[in-house]
């Protein structure tokens, strides 16, 4: 027993140590275990076909807002302050 910590803290340390040890041992066996290997089908990730194409200007009305003249000018000023690369 360590004199500087309480019995509850010692029990907590032992539980943490056992959990960490079990995790490390489990991770050591995972790569050798065939059930964790899932090869991807041929051509699964060619390009970004999973991302849909952007719709044109005729989008859903909920996806656009009408700006006032002051808001448009403020937005234009904000865009001018952004650095160009």
Image (cartoon, helix red, strand yellow):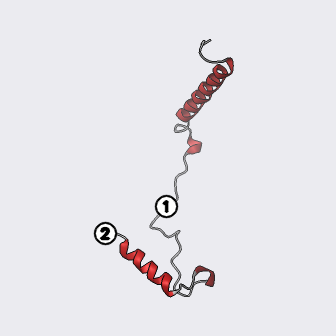
Mark number, residue 85: 2
Question: Looking at this view, is 61 or 41 the one in front?
Answer: 61
Q: Residue at x 44, y 83 (%)?
A: 73
Give the residue pinned by disc 1: 42
Query: Could you tell me which secondary element the residue under label 1 belongs to?
Result: loop
State which mark lies toward you, 1 or 2. 2
Q: Residue at x 49, y 84 (%)?
A: 70
Q: Residue at x 61, y 83 (%)?
A: 60
Q: How many marks?
A: 2
Picture quadrant of residue 15: top right
Q: Position of residue 54 (x, y in %)?
A: 51, 78
- In the figure, is residue 69 to the left or right of 80? right
Mark number, residue 71: none
Q: Alpha-carbon neighbours of circle 2 within 10 Å: few (<14), some, or many (≥20)?
A: few
Question: Looking at this view, is 19 or 75 the one in front?
Answer: 75
Q: Residue at x 64, y 22 (%)?
A: 9
The residue lying furthest to the right in this view is 8
Q: Is residue 47 above or below residue 54?
A: above
Q: CA distance from mark 1 to mark 2?
A: 37 Å
Q: Position of residue 35 (x, y in %)?
A: 59, 43
């Amino acid at each position: 027993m360590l004199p500087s910590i309480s019995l509850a803290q010692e029990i907590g340390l032992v539980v943490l140590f056992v959990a960490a040890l079990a995790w490390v041992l489990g991770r050591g066996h995972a790569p050798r275990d065939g059930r964790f290997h899932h090869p991807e089908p041929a051509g699964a990730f060619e390009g970004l076909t999973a991302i849909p194409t952007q719709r044109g200007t005729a989008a859903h009305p909920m996806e656009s807002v009408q700006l006032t003249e002051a808001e448009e000018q403020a937005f234009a000023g904000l865009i001018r302050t952004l650095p160009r690369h």
